[in-house]
Image (tube, coloured by chain):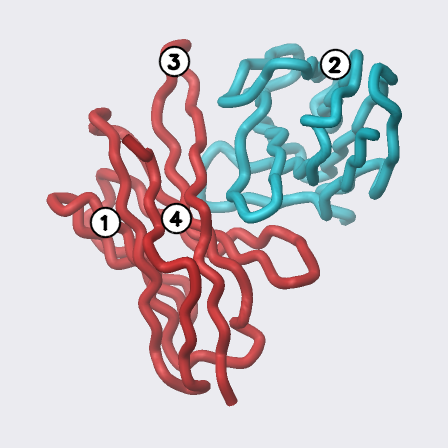
Chain colours: A red, B cyan
Amino acid sequence: AQKITQTQPGMFVQEKEAVTLDCTYDTSDPSYGLFWYKQPSSGEMIFLIYQGSYDQQNATEGRYSLNFQKARKSANLVISASQLGDSAMYFCAMREPDSGGYQKVTFGTGTKLQVIP
Amino acid sequence: NAGVTQTPKFRVLKTGQSMTLLCAQDMNHEYMYWYRQDPGMGLRLIHYSVGEGTTAKGEVPDGYNVSRLKKQNFLLGLESAAPSQTSVYFCASRTAGWETQYFGPGTRLLVL
């Protein structure tokens, strides 16, 4: 089974509208974390937001919020008031323990978001 | 404060050649990571380090070796490059908590 699934290869959103990017995950470990990253066309990777599995509140960072639904194993990214600069690839990722007691990180395949003026 | 830097930015290798990619961070982070990104895919973890002198294998470690002799540097080596190692390589570092992570600008590697 895929560890991280992003089912939306591409999405469009009107400027100033909110948009939700979907992410579902699969793990049997109770201690894990979920991340979202942004990759503009320039290629750099930008960390956006993190949610730990034991965190009671949904994570928020400015216009970004992570809608964490543990029972559904989903960790959707919500971007409020979209801006043209939000056009980019967005990756969901998960950290979980590996067999050596450290942490491994797995990325999804990404969603390309295009913001329309 | 330069953050995370990667050297070189771009390199072309012939099959069988060796090279070392350097990642340096000036934020005193314990944790450092090497990822590769192939076209149309997310990042895959190659190796990582939880502190000076310690390294561990990630999802795709074969064909790569790493060293963390100094806390600020994390080296990724290719002993005998193969065309399948053509990729963009990203280094990242983070604090003890996962809430703060920084990535380098990436190294584009082409193996002919």
Residue type for callout 2: Leu
Q: Chain of mark 1?
A: A
Q: Secondary structure at mark 1?
A: strand
| Distance from the alpha carbon under mark 1 to that under mark 2 | 39 Å
Q: Which residue is mark 3?
A: A101
Q: Secondary structure at mark 2?
A: loop
Q: Which sits in the foreground, A111 or A98?
A: A111
- Please give the residue where the numbered disc 1 appears in the rendered image: A74
* Residue corresponding to mark 2: B69
Q: Quadrant of residue A105?
A: top left
Q: Position of residue B24 (x, y in %)?
A: 76, 33
Q: Closer to the camera: disc 3 or disc 1? A: 1
Label 4: which secondary element: strand
**Is A54 in front, or is B45?**
B45
- Tell me if residue B24 comes above or below residue A100 in the rendering: below
Instruction: Please check whether the numbered discs 4 and 2 fall on a single chain.
Output: no
Which numbered disc, 4 or 1, marks the residue that appears first in the sequence? 4
> What residue is shown with label 4?
A50
Per the model, the C-alpha gap separating discs 4 and 3 is 21 Å
- The answer as to whether the residues below labels 1 and 2 share one chain is no
The answer as to whether the residues below labels 4 and 3 share one chain is yes
Q: Are marks 2 and 3 in contact (CB under 8 Å)?
A: no
Badge 3 or badge 1: first in the primary sequence: 1
User: Looking at this view, is B100 or B42 the one in front?
Assistant: B42
Q: Residue furthest bottom?
A: A117
Q: Are marks 4 and 3 in contact (CB under 8 Å)?
A: no
Q: Is B35 above or below relative to A43? A: above
